[in-house]
Amino acid sequence: MGENFEMRLKEFKEYMTRIEYLNSATSVLSWDMMVSIPKKGKAYRSDVLGYLSSESYKLQTSDTMKEFIDYFISQENLDDVTESMVRNAKKSYDQTKKIPEDRYREYVVLASNSFSAWEEARAKSDYSIFKPYLEKIVKFNQEFLEYWGYEGNKYNTLLDLYEPGITVEKLDKVFGELREAIVNLLEKIQKSSVKPNTDFFYKHFTKEEQEEFGVFVASKLGYDFEAGRIDVSAHPFTTTFDNKDVRITTRYDENEFRGALFSTIHESGHAIYEQNIPDELKGTGLATGVSMGVHESQSRYYENILGRSKEFWKYFYPEAQKRFKQFEGVSLEEFYKAINVVEPSLIRTESDELTYSLHIIIRYEIEKELINGRISMDELPKVWNAKYKEYLGVEPKNDAEGVLQDMHWSDGSFGYFPSYALGNLYGAQFLSKLLKDIPDYYSLVERGEFDKIHEWLKENIHKHGSVYKPADIIKMVTGEELNAKYFIEYLNNKYSKIYNL
Amino acid sequence: MGENFEMRLKEFKEYMTRIEYLNSATSVLSWDMMVSIPKKGKAYRSDVLGYLSSESYKLQTSDTMKEFIDYFISQENLDDVTESMVRNAKKSYDQTKKIPEDRYREYVVLASNSFSAWEEARAKSDYSIFKPYLEKIVKFNQEFLEYWGYEGNKYNTLLDLYEPGITVEKLDKVFGELREAIVNLLEKIQKSSVKPNTDFFYKHFTKEEQEEFGVFVASKLGYDFEAGRIDVSAHPFTTTFDNKDVRITTRYDENEFRGALFSTIHESGHAIYEQNIPDELKGTGLATGVSMGVHESQSRYYENILGRSKEFWKYFYPEAQKRFKQFEGVSLEEFYKAINVVEPSLIRTESDELTYSLHIIIRYEIEKELINGRISMDELPKVWNAKYKEYLGVEPKNDAEGVLQDMHWSDGSFGYFPSYALGNLYGAQFLSKLLKDIPDYYSLVERGEFDKIHEWLKENIHKHGSVYKPADIIKMVTGEELNAKYFIEYLNNKYSKIYNL
């Protein structure tokens, strides 16, 4: 690693920094488009975003980039960060360069039209409008997989885009175990005589009061408002401009209490992760959460494992009662049960902590077969509905509340869904280690002292950014490979108590 | 103008569009930095902005740009838009390319440090901190003028940066006449027994009420909220992302009524101008107001000529009284006098419609001499204070309320100040024509019917964007060259009535 190496590395980082700047600008413009833009400004903004994206794309796929990759790949004994930086750059370089340019261009156009078709199809609840587009999208993905190559199942390569290192073989096992456990548990819960009352959540809560409480909770958890802010958008999201400006959004329903609050806590989990990524990773392309799955493990840990625990509300409920007269006469126990009520539903985004994973597993099972050409476009809605019936005991009355509910397939994001359920599994596995490392975890939570937990997450997970692969992180942190055991245990424990099973 | 010409023009416009995209992105990021950014996000944002600016700069000064310019300059019989497009591109190309790169880089660093020094100097009210920086800034400008060249007075070239075509010869004349007229009028006003009461403006007005009224007035005037929005920032401004997204900001003082309202009206004037620029000018670099001065003519027309007229308030005052109980018992006449009270002050940004131009004329007179090396750095504060004493009858007690009050010199924006007063002159000259073209002007205003006026401004001024030079616009619209007569008449008429002169 002589002088030349250091010089090249410096150049490489400067080059990556330009990509990061463009991506940061793109994120600001997109955030503004979701949060602030006046109606008529959207068309031009799309053009500007298209331009910036294409500039970033050019840098990511340039000959200069290839030279950097070739040079560093030929070097031995790279440190973890540099190795990861090169692997990462190579992955996105290959992902694009292996596809013939004209095919990729056709695909981009198709994906855009497909999204419009999906919107129309959902509005009209008519799958047949979307079907021809979906068929083409799937075929394109199958074609791309031939360019990209794959090991074992074709779908592995798509999974790898969102969750590096995860495979069908692995997921079949953990999702299989998880599905069985949840379906069993759900059956018992539905037979239980415990029926939590949730009426008090449907009173009137002003936007301002909800917002203030959300800010109070998020601050307590460690979301740094000097490096972020909360705004309103149609769909809640988190976006990173850099680790010092990580913004979240939520939406307020003045006639329902839980939605805004838990989405704020969820997004705070994502944002705390991003805020904790160290400055040193800037200029490497690694200054962001490592994968969708690990990201969801953080947001779901905050939202569910922590945010729907009894200890959490032992601390926050008195404050909530002080602020919201609507909870007068509602005991902590009643409140706790009500935020954990289990109700199998048709819509993923409205589902509870227990059944959420089933929604994902259904999508995983279907995607896998679609990509391998084992479900036809015609039978897709039937397969969908049958799985909902079998696992959740509910059946869509139409396509809009069935196969058309999510936008993910319209732009070809196959392989993305599993991350959501992986987040649950990772989260519970992290929790088991967290409890060993911080024996007084529960009493800290009861006292509203979240610093140690925040610090643990930062030191064990956040500070690594994207340096290590998800599987490595799990292993480094917990000493074990990913497995479903911890999450299943967690669910059994939690719901047995709530539902007297 | 054969096929090749058309093809080259298309390419040129595509090239200009890239610059416009970058500038739009830069504007969004800057707006966000003024309006939304969390504290810790500013440092990285500055870096991103620096990067985008340098990318835009590269495009503006590239060899490709030179080829476009050379090609189109050699063509004959260009239409107005193309000719202007080339002239404009050439101007900004030359402006940069004529300066040796290392000198320019030094200057950028100096300007940045100079701004910090100015901030500190103003905070400590100590000119000596700023003096060495100002001295260097002036020297750099003098050096640049040698590269750029000049005709007549050196200062002409600087004026031309902000107000193409305006010269010292012209300004000496119109500003001379204007100064004399205002000083005379001010003398009479100060002797008048009329002393408008403004107490009722210092009651408590909530931010929300002020905002609602501001939105009401701005909408009535024709500011399109589907192509814009109002936010809060430390200093009010207008920014254009494209003609369909032109945003304004204001600031609210809950203990003073006028500030936020008139700044909203002022910025609405800028914004209406930008919203009315036609789509066809996109991709030419001309899709923006033609000059600072013409821009100010629009904002000041809305704020002062229209917004502080009695007819305007005949319409709006009943609405204001309905909304603000604070005005109970205050007659329209009293209200009207109170928004037009004349009070010579030390601070430009706090001055009234009459004396505002004197603040500008003082700066013009000083800048001109500074650039020509006829005022030394040591005597500058004394010259400043003496002119305030002479023209306005007030004298700064310290540097902060004197020579240090504006940031403009800290980044070397010499030649910018005159635009503000030119706006007043243009505005009154436009008014004289407006009154001829719309004989029922005053009764329209009294009835709150602003469409015809809006349309007149759009057709005569706004729709041209930057296609014609300011002097050409004035001539085209009014048939006369710029002169001080109309504004002086306007002032004499208005204040004679208010102050019974």
Image: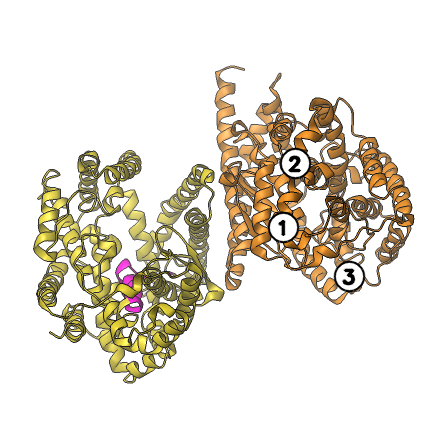
Chain colours: A orange, B yellow
Helix, strand or loop status at disc 2: helix
Q: Which mark is residue A400?
A: 3
Q: Quickly name the residue at label 2.
A: A94
Q: Are marks 2 and 1 on the same chain?
A: yes
Question: Rounded to the nearest whole Å, what is the CA distance between mark 3 and mark 1?
Answer: 21 Å
Residue B244, given in percent of the width and then of the height, sits at 46, 63
The quadrant where residue A135 appears: bottom right
Residue B399, given in percent of the width and then of the height, sits at 18, 42
Residue A163, given in percent of the width and then of the height, sits at 72, 36
Which chain letter matches label 1? Answer: A
Could you tell me the amino acid type at mark 1? Pro
Please provide the residue range marked out in magenta: B288-303
Q: Quickly name the residue at label 1.
A: A236
Could you tell me the amino acid type at mark 3? Ala
Question: Rounded to the nearest whole Å, what is the CA distance between mark 2 and mark 1?
Answer: 32 Å
Mark in the foreground, 2 or 1: 1
Residue A23 is left or right of residue A156, and the answer is: left
Q: Is residue B290 magenta?
A: yes
